[in-house]
Image (spheres, coloured by chain):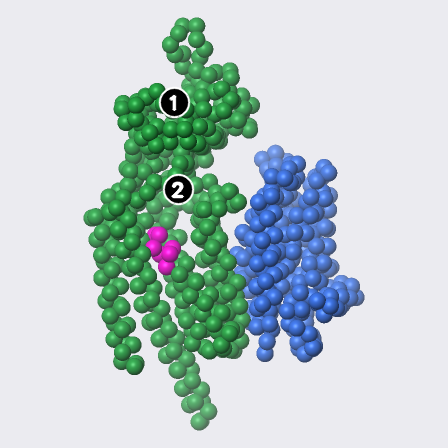
Amino acid sequence: MRMDRKKLGTILVVVSVVLILMTVYLAVFFAPLPQTGVKSAGEILSSVEGSKLKVAGFVSAVYSIHFGMLDGPDEVIFSLADFRDYGRYLQANATHSLNQQWWTVRPIDIKSISGGLNPRMGPNLGGVIVVGANLSMDGIVTSNTIAPNSNVTGFSLSSGSGNDITFGSVGSFGLMTAPVAQKIFYFHMPSAWACYLSFGVTLVGSALFLRTRDHKYDRVAYSSAEIGIVFATIAITTGPVWARQEWGVYWRWDDMKLVTTFVLWLVYIGYLSLRAAISEPSAKARVSAVYGILSFITVPMSFLSSRVAPLLQSSHPQVIATSSGSLSPQAGMTIGIAVVAFTVLFITMLIKRVEIAEAEEELEELKRKIGDEE
Amino acid sequence: MRAALIIAAKDLKVELRSKEMLSAMFLFSLLIVLAFRFGFSNAVNSGAVGLPELASSALWICFSFAAILGMYTSFAKEKDRETLDGLLLAPVDRSDLYLGKALSNLIVVFFVDLLSIAFFALFFSFDYGGQALAVVALALLGSVTLVLVGTLVAAISVNTRAREALLPILLIPLIAFSVIVPSVTATKNAMVGGIGDSVQQIESVAAFAAIFAVLGYLTFDFVLEG
């Protein structure tokens, strides 16, 4: 039986190594970089005609233009960029590090008739557009005068009270390719999944331990928590690598997904500190099982934070928030294999960690026996 | 349930006689509000930080830390005087013990909340402007959630070696999003006049109170056993 388990362990190690290598290969050479971030006016026009759009960001530039008729009113055009932080934008602009980054390179131009600014454009504006001010507007796409995918010049977003918001020319917000750091997604998302899974196993192990008082469940619970912390650490360190490229910053404290995941990590660090602070084995198992159950509430909090965002005031960088784009088939396949790879890796690590825990306990037992004989 | 009330009454009686916890928490909350007064004096005087924003955050930091201190003491005291064993020998359900402890903690914590709210008005010359009742109600709601999870975690930490250091480590991450973040938002909304904007936050705090109550009720037994 023991021999079989050892064999199984070896097979699992080999399988998980192969799967991880496969994921690396697929992520690097197979999955294409998605065309994300900015959509062309034609694409948006055909897909969201009549639907609701939200534009949000800060005003990066304001200029006044006189169009068409000589006696017509001046129009104010302002560019909206999404950083929510004007100081950071200026800094990035000064160091020329804005290339190929989120919206700031090619901001949306929003046109408005001068003098008649919609008060809904921002509570602090008071009718004047201030550079650096945060703006967010909801509206319904109304213009359908331009054929989809043609060389359109723009479309307008009806904001509900007369002033249409006009998006600039195609050139000012064309299709953009995600930064190459996007590939880290194939490791980021599966490790987040693996950490949720590990903490789920900790929950089940803790509950079973309290029910049966069988220490094998306690071993599974804390082994799984340790592995979960490893995966959570991978998830919260790979995220910033991507975020630096995509958002221009490593971390956003206003994004609830990031913050709740960080808290999740802290809670399970707390779980391990709790175990370290109790010496008596049965009390350690009992008390930490209760905390292991309690800690699990942070898992749905982290998992759901991007879904129930309004409750938690999430402000993910979505200048145009429509339904999320779906993955290409190649990317879908890669992420599928990556999830399988990380799941197998988790199972392998769990089996190995439980074996170590058993060996440790056996050693303690032997030490005690020797002590008794002397 | 009756047992829970008796335990809470016993705790409060002990507290009223010694006033140990109350006096410590009173000074503690006074000092936290003062620390904010000194620490933020430039920001407040120059108007860089709005008082409602500062008040909501400062109050909740104050409530949380004072509650941690109080809940820790309520168990540490029993443990140190070896009265915890007596309490465990009492022929009552452990779950009632949990409810009783939570109730007595809530009363003490809420009393300190009221003091902090008053201290804030005093030191920052802040006028709650008719919203004081809403702020108090939110403090009570948040404290219920805080105490329900805190009592359980305090009982967990009292069993450990580094118990006073461990309680904040174990508790703060759990209350960060269940109590502090939504309560701060709701309190700020209430101060600028619209408690109606915070329905979601209030619902969320109340939902966590229910979750923690159920978890505490079911698992408290295991924490204090043996």
Task: Work out whether residue B34 or residue A51 is closer to the camera in this orientation and state it.
Answer: A51
On the image, which quarter does residue A344 sit in? bottom left
Q: Which chain is blue?
A: B
Q: Is residue B27 visible?
A: no
Amino acid carrying label 1: it is Ser
x%, y% of residue B35? 64, 48
Magenta residues, as a range? A188-194
Circle nearer the N terminus (2, 1):
1
> What is chain A's hue in the picture?
green
- Assess disc 2: are there few (<14), some (14-19) or many (≥20) residues with their C-alpha within 10 Å of its C-alpha: some
Task: Work out whether residue A334 or residue A266 is closer to the camera in this orientation and state it.
Answer: A334
Establish if A51 lies above or below B208: above
Establish if B177 lies above or below A178: below
Q: Main secondary structure of the magenta part?
A: helix
Q: Which mark is residue A249?
A: 2
User: Which residue is found at the position 45% from the left and 24% from the top?
Assistant: A158
Residue A9 lies within the magenta run: no
